[in-house]
């Protein structure tokens, strides 16, 4: 027992001191930027200058501020989607694939619904995207509930399957007849999301993302289904003992999760790209996992985390343009932040005590 | 001289004293039983000897030499081998490979030499086994032999067997006993951990009895009867609550089990034709050493384990295979056995209090938070739960957690109450509170099934006592006729009374 010989030990505590809880987000930011500044220094750039472009300059003009919201839109939807599943203890890592399922539906409906007025076409697209995401989430959910097959593996692997389906579609039937590019034909004008602010990129999808956040909050805190979901997620045997249908609850949570991820795909097709492309999602489905975790599976937390990640994404482009630091700095920062945050949350459950 | 001499060993786990100044001496060439109920401290003592735990105080001598055993490696070097209930074998490897695994081997293994050694040893001790056989294809009894061979291959002179017969069928038990006698004849010493009296009297030379972490005494097996051993093992203490003996007016049956059967998690029958009747205003205590099907019984009657045969009746109504929600509706109050698993401990006290009856507080899918709050505050006050409604349940003490569970169930005035191990891990005050509540429910007319491994609790509360042994009810006694001796004999499977 090597640990016994150390002078200090970690003691588990149920009640972290209040100052610790409020200090944690600040510490997470500080440590993250300390670690990433090492990478910035390697690029031979002054870290403070880089941070200015990274975090402050995107907020200084209206155009770039709106761009933060645009970037946050798919992240928020993915974060909400993941939070639904994770709350019920269903670890859906397949939001990426479910997002593309929604995107395929949107691209298809966008072609089919030519001439249908927006007021009908857009809701139909949303419903179609939700159903498509749900359908793609159905198989792993059933395997989990019926046969106890680990959903982390199945949902993750189905992402690759979906990537090939998208690729097959874009290189086969949907290849653009005019340009020959692997992209689907452009969707009808009536199915394009209208802009929330004229002459900007901010579209209806952001409003839908906010509604999704509200729905997450309402379901988790105000409905009996939400309580059942959380009970299943936090203590399956106890939930079963109390008479909650664990399988059914898990299945519904998984399907809602897939559906909302599908809507993220619709939002990107109808709000930004106007056709399906292979690079539609910049790993939004995976980043959603980070956002849901950082946000503590809580609606407000998810909203804040996705806005912050939107800022980092925008800032990474700004800093890259201004100082020549690679754009990947944004992704690295997000990943480091998750690791630091997980470490800190683990630490707050312990106190450091000197051995007697 | 003693080959193993443990003197005044103490070991605490938090507040629990697992070994309280226990002394234990093992002679060369004897089979020595460590007898006691679950939680008496037998396994803890042996884990200390095998280096898995470190004693808080006390001295261990091997061959008269004081030693300190820091790990199983040290123990093996001192010639001590242990076979636990959970075998440490690698299923895809062969018998021979498992036996040499982890031992100081030369870099290049001489497979034929190992096979020959193993074959020779297995023949000498009467444990026929093919060294080339894949462990996955072996029966449980054969795997146990591999574990014993493994210890012998490491030159063990002292063999600790932790409840070795628990996993065996009767024929395999006979083979095991033959092996043990051969080991004894070769001059090895065997420590045989058990709570089964007939096995202890059949195979051992001496017995050391443990109870509540203390050594009660060591006796020669030949000089003592099973009754006397049972009394030593079970003991008796005084209680904080008293049960009024009810007048002998005939009352009607409220809860009936008819030939109830169920399987355990490995799909092996755990309940074998359980038939019990509990009347209005009666506490039926179910006694037994842990692991004899009590957990499965509680789960089955609580509706969370499938019934494979038989019937369950509440006031004459068939409720076999009903869901927890349906059981709540017909008036079965179910207290879960494990407080940490029976409640979602990361949710708030309020949420746990309403979890079973969510439908009552829900209007078109939305929870009426005001009604929930009022309800929870009422229960917290009535059952003196020391917590605020929005406290996370995990932060409560064991006693308060149990109060939350009791409040959830008892406030519904159920006709039938199932309470498995209601006071396990509670302090004296909380224990008395829980027992008092159960007696009040009995007074109210509830039919109570009290499943407990604490015999004192059973004796203090029950009107009648049923004893469970290996998934069967081996006897039902009125409280007045239940002496510790008689219960001890039933609990250890030595006799059946029905």
Image (spheres, coloured by chain):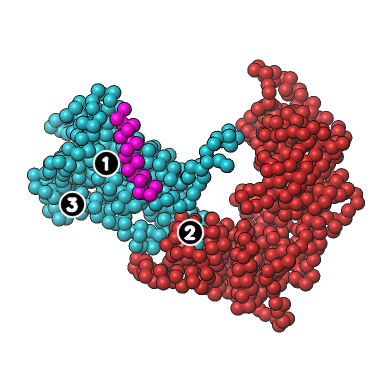
Compared with B252, B35 (above or below) is above
Compared with B346, A314 (above or below) is above
For the residue pair B368 and B140, the one nearer the viewer reads as B368
For the residue pair A312 and B61, the one nearer the viewer reads as B61
Task: Identify the image quadrant of the C terminus of chain A.
Answer: top right
* Mark 3: few/some/many CA within 10 Å (<14, 14-19, 20+): many
Magenta range is A19-38
Distance Cα–Cα, label 1 vs label 2: 34 Å
Q: Which chain is red?
A: B
In the displayed structure image, the side of residue A341 where residue B497 appears, left or right: right
Q: In the image, is residue A32 part of the stretch drawn in magenta?
A: yes
> Given the image, what chain letter belongs to the residue carrying mark 2?
B
Q: Answer yes or no: is residue B82 visible.
A: yes
Residue that sits furthest to the left in the current view: A199
**Residue at 35 percent of width and 49 percent of height:** A22
- Report the residue marked by disc 3: A122
Q: Nearer the viewer, mark 3 or mark 1?
A: 1
Q: Which chain is cyan?
A: A
Label 1 residue SS: helix
Q: In the image, is residue A105 part of the stretch drawn in magenta?
A: no
> Given the image, what chain letter belongs to the residue carrying mark 3?
A
**Residue at 24 percent of width and 55 percent of height:** A211
In the displayed structure image, the side of residue B73 where residue B403 appears, left or right: left
Compared with A58, B301 (above or below) is below
Same subunit under labels 3 and 1? Answer: yes
Mark drawn on residue B393: 2
- Report the residue marked by disc 1: A309
């Amino acid at each position: 027992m090597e640990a016994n010989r150390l002078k200090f030990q970690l003691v588990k505590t149920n009640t972290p001191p209040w100052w610790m809880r409020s200090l944690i987000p600040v510490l997470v930011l500080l440590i993250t930027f300390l670690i990433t500044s090492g990478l910035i220094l390697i690029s031979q750039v002054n870290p403070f200058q880089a941070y200015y472009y990274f975090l402050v300059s995107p907020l200084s003009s209206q155009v770039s501020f709106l761009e933060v919201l645009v970037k946050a839109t798919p992240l928020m939807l993915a974060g909400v989607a993941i939070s639904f599943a994770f709350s019920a203890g269903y670890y859906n890592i397949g939001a990426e694939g479910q997002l593309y399922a929604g995107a395929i539906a949107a691209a298809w409906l966008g072609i089919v619904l030519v001439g249908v007025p927006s007021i009908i076409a857009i809701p139909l697209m949303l419903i179609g995207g939700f159903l498509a995401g749900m359908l793609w989430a159905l198989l792993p959910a059933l395997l989990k509930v019926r046969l106890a097959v680990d959903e982390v593996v199945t949902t993750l692997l189905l992402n690759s399957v979906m990537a090939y389906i998208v690729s097959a579609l874009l290189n086969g039937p949907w290849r653009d007849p005019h340009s020959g590019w692997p992209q689907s034909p452009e969707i009808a004008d009536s199915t394009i999301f209208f802009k929330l602010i004229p002459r900007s990129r901010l579209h209806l999808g952001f409003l839908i993302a906010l509604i999704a956040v509200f729905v997450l909050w309402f379901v988790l805190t105000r409905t009996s289904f939400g309580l059942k979901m959380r009970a299943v997620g936090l203590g399956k045997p106890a939930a079963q003992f109390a008479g909650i249908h664990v399988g059914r609850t898990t299945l519904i949570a998984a399907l809602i999760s897939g559906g909302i991820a599908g809507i993220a795909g619709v939002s990107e097709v109808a709000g930004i790209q106007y056709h399906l492309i292979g690079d539609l999602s910049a790993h939004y489905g995976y980043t959603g996992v980070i956002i849901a975790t950082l946000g503590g599976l809580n609606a407000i937390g998810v909203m804040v985390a996705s806005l912050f990640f939107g800022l980092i994404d925008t800032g990474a482009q700004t800093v890259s343009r201004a100082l020549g630091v690679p754009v990947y700095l944004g992704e690295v920062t997000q990943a480091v932040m998750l690791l630091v945050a997980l470490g800190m949350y683990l630490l707050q459950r312990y106190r450091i005590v000197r051995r007697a | 001289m003693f080959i193993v001499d443990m003197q005044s060993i103490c070991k605490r786990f938090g507040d629990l004293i697992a070994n309280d100044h226990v002394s234990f001496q093992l002679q060369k060439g004897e089979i020595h039983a460590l007898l006691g109920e679950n939680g008496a401290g037998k396994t803890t003592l042996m884990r200390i000897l095998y280096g898995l735990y470190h004693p808080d105080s006390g001295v261990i001598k091997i061959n008269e030499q004081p030693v300190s055993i820091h790990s199983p490696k040290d123990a093996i070097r001192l010639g001590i081998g242990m076979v636990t209930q959970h075998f440490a074998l690698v299923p895809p490897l062969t018998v021979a490979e498992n036996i040499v695994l982890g031992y100081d081997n030369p870099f290049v293994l001489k497979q034929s030499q190992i096979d020959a050694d193993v074959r020779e040893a297995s023949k000498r001790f009467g444990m026929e086994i093919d060294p080339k056989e894949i462990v996955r294809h072996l029966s449980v009894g054969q795997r146990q032999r591999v574990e014993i061979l493994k210890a012998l291959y490491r030159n063990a002179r002292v063999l600790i067997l932790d409840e070795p017969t628990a996993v065996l069928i009767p024929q395999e038990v006979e083979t095991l006993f033959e092996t043990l006698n051969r080991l004894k004849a070769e001059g090895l010493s065997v420590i045989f951990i058990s709570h089964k009296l007939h096995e202890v009297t059949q195979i051992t030379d001496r017995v050391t009895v443990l109870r509540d972490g203390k050594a009660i005494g060591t006796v020669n097996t030949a000089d003592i009867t099973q009754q006397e051993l049972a009394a030593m093992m079970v003991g008796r203490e005084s209680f904080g609550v008293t049960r009024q003996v009810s007048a002998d007016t005939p009352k009607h049956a409220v809860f009936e089990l008819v030939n109830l059967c169920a399987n355990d998690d490995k799909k092996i029958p755990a309940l074998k034709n359980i038939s019990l009747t509990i009347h209005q205003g009666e506490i039926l205590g179910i006694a037994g050493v842990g692991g004899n099907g009590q957990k499965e019984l509680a789960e089955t009657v609580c509706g969370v384990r499938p019934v494979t045969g038989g019937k369950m009746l509440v006031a004459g109504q068939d409720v076999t295979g009903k869901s927890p929600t349906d059981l709540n509706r017909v008036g079965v109050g179910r207290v879960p056995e494990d407080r940490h698993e029976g409640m979602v401990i990361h949710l708030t006290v309020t949420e746990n209090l309403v979890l079973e009856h969510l439908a009552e507080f829900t209007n078109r899918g939305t929870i009426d938070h005001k009604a929930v709050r009022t309800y929870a505050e009422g229960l917290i006050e009535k059952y003196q739960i020391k917590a605020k409604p929005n406290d996370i349940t995990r932060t409560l003490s064991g006693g308060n957690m149990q109060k939350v569970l009791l409040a959830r169930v008892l406030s519904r005035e159920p006709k039938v109450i199932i309470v498995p191990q209601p006071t396990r891990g509670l302090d004296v005050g909380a224990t008395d509170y829980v027992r008092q509540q159960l007696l009040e429910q009995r007074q109210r007319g509830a039919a109570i099934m009290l499943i407990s491994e604490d015999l004192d609790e059973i004796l203090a509360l029950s009107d009648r006592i049923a004893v469970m042994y290996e998934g069967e009810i081996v006897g039902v006694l009125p409280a007045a006729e239940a002496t510790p001796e008689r219960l001890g004999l039933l609990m250890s499977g030595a006799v059946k009374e029905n």
